[in-house]
Image (cartoon, rainbow, N blue to C red):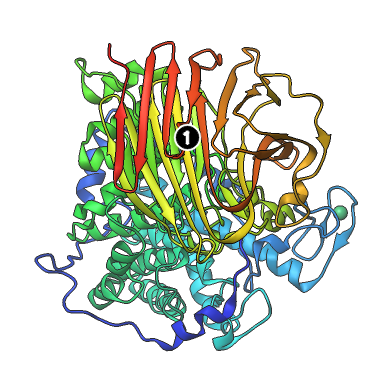
Amino acid sequence: MRSPFVRCVPCLFVLGLLLSPIATGSAFADNEPRFDPPPRLAITAAELAKRKNSPEFPALRKEAVAQGDALLKNPITLPTGSGDWTFYYACPDHGVDLQAKNLDEHVCPICKKVYTTERIKAAYRTRLHDRANIAAMELGWAYAYTGDDRYAREAQRILLKFADDYPGYPPRHDRWGRTGIFAHLGGRRYAQSLDEAVGVINLCKGYDLTRTSKVWTDAQREHVEKDLFRPIADTLLFANLGINNHQTWFNAGLMCIASVLGDKALVEKVLTMKGGFRYQVEKSMGDNGFWYEGSMAYHNYALQAMLDIIDAGRRMGIPLHEDPRIKAMILAPLRYAYPNGTFPAINDSDSGHISSFNGSFEWAWKLYGDPRFARAIAQGNEARLKELLGSDAKGGPAIDTTSANLPDAGLIALRRGSGPNATCVMVDYGEHGGGHGHFDKLNIVVYANGREWLLDPGRLTYSHKEYKTWVKETAAHNTVTLGGETQSKTTGKALWFQPQDQYAACATQTDLAYPGSVLTRYLLLADNILIDVYDVAADKPTQIDWVAHAISEKLQPVENLGPGMTASPGERNGYQHLTEGKSWTVTKPTQWDFVSATPDKAKLRMWIAGPSQETLFTCKGIGHYINMLVPCLVRRVQGQQAQFVAVYDLSGRGDYVTSVEVPPGDGLQVKVGTTGGAWSVAFTKTGVKCTPPTK
Ligand SMILES: [Zn+2]
Ligand SMILES: [Zn+2]
């Protein structure tokens, strides 16, 4: 739950500091680590020889030489002293990065104010440290591809400088000014161990690639190993964050250090300790391979470190990639994405795209040879797919087209069709998602007509106050609130999941989002329709609100209901962001159109029924950006129980569904007339009885 850009709660980890790593038997089974002559971390001698004979090599070499030459021509400035948090390098008034006049004077490009404080100078040194790490690796590749000792000598300059300086950096400190055991996230060269870990990976690779050059003496090699890499390992072993993604990076840094030092015991520790590689594979994800934080942004962040660990390991002869959860972790984005490749912004995430995983897909394609990865890389480009899979390659969507229950992600994804007509509905029922979770049990997102309709706003940015006052609140989601309150943090459950030929259906439930009250949501997705029955049994009479936010220009009733009253659905728990409110009280089923702003003026028509009387509000909430207003429908019932029926016409034109009937007495039955025939659906706690149209 702690990312580099999130301030976190320190006290959670104090206990972690006191726990020493626990070794649980041999890490290696049949594969003891092997330390071949270098290079053996960034690449092996055999891989390097193969690469030099590959058709891509001239281009790779040219690029590496260009980078190496630039670093020889303008050698980078090596900082003397440790760094502070990189985000401190900004003008407090304008929030923009400063520009360095020299090491001591830093100018805001907007107000031209010159900053000379120690904290800003230290944050600037962090930038220089970061550049040096990357330079060491780039010089390493230039040397590996050319054998030109000038590149090795410049990489050596960087490594020796840090080896000279590391023992003299201040003891453990963090960006809040704490030191020693209180700086549990802190570092020495940097103000956080996360930066130490990310940085040392590149330094290790630069060393691995150049240390066989004749520019290195044995004494210099020993200096770098003993005075730089070993103390960084100690820094990274100081605190243990368990399943957390920072720990994944610590593990990656430690594994790279173990490789260059040829330290078998350290390899074993990284693989077996609490929070180590195997522990995280067991506890930070499940068999679906979804990282526990429930967000593709954090999934990707943890995956990058995992791949560094695995590469270091397999080059020591330990086939860490053979754990099926690793492959599942790289397939996960394809199971989580909408049909167009974007991700729903569930929990603290953004509407990213599967292409942000391209590097991992390439990596997995080389290692596993599974055509799903080739399709993910090609993303519909037939020529590229033939390049990868051969001339008789069949295309096909990279994104999963089958419905799936994904308990690690806490989601069920209902899917129909492929190509431009594909539809996808996800219901978020499971794991809260640690500190990055939202109070959104039984929230749904809906994709149809080539776009996202019902959305989760995601995280906006952490610096907006709406991060706390809107995005996490239940009212910002497409689910139910009771008493106008936000839900409690909890894990719900899937009652059943039935993927069939003509439809896919599921039921999900929570009895702890509002302790004592049971919320159950039944969904059935078929071609062009989504049937949604939300059953509420509250522990006492209260205000029951059913909420739907859809990306569109406007929300309007299909029938003329009159002008409505100006009314706000609430003042707190996120409701304060629901503006332009109007309300109607209705005693019969109604139909509503979310009308898209796109030139096609596509419609998401919603037929709503169920309660004998409900108060309806239209209003506008906040979407994926702070200025993105999104129309919202709130259905309100006062009482102890309610069954909200909604049938979504997914044709994009609003003309597919022709009638919706809820037989009296039991809201769990729905009859839907469509231009393709009549559907009769009865949901129960154990499944669905469904009569699709006969053809
Ligand atoms: Zn300024
Ligand atoms: Zn959310």
Question: Extreme front residue here?
Answer: 665
Residue shown at the point (35%, 57%) measured from the top left: 306
Q: Nearer the viewer, residue 52 or 575?
A: 575
Q: Position of residue 124 (x, y in %)?
A: 69, 62
Residue 578 placement (x, y as % from top left): 75, 44
Q: Is residue 196 left or right of residue 207?
A: right
Viewer-proximal residue, 63 or 246?
A: 246
Q: Crowdedness of circle 1 by 10 Å Cα count: few (<14), some, many (20+)?
A: few
Residue 330 location (% of width, % of height): 33, 45
In the image: residue 535, left or right of residue 395: right
* Residue at 56% over, 35% down: 454
**Image vertical order of residue 223 relative to residue 684, above or below:** below
Quick check: 389 above or below 111? above
Residue 680 visible, this angle: yes
The residue positioned 17% from the left and 65% from the top of the image is: 34
Identity, as a three-letter code, of the amino acid under mark 1: Pro
Query: Between 495 and 672, which is closer to the camera in this rendering?
Result: 672
Residue 670 left/right relative to 384: right
Q: Between residue 626 and residue 534, name the one nearer to us.
A: 534
- Assign a secondary structure to mark 1: loop
Q: How many marks?
A: 1
Q: Position of residue 231 (x, y in %)?
A: 44, 79
State which quadrant residue 28 falls in: bottom left
Query: The C terminus lies in which quarter of the figure?
Result: top left
474 up-or-down from 562: above or below: below
Q: Quadrant of ligand 1?
A: bottom right
Residue under the image location 43 percent in, 77 percent down: 240
Determine which quarter of the picture holds residue 210: bottom left
- Asked whether the viewer can see residue 61, the reply is no
* Residue that badge 1 annotates: 664
Q: Residue furthest left?
A: 30
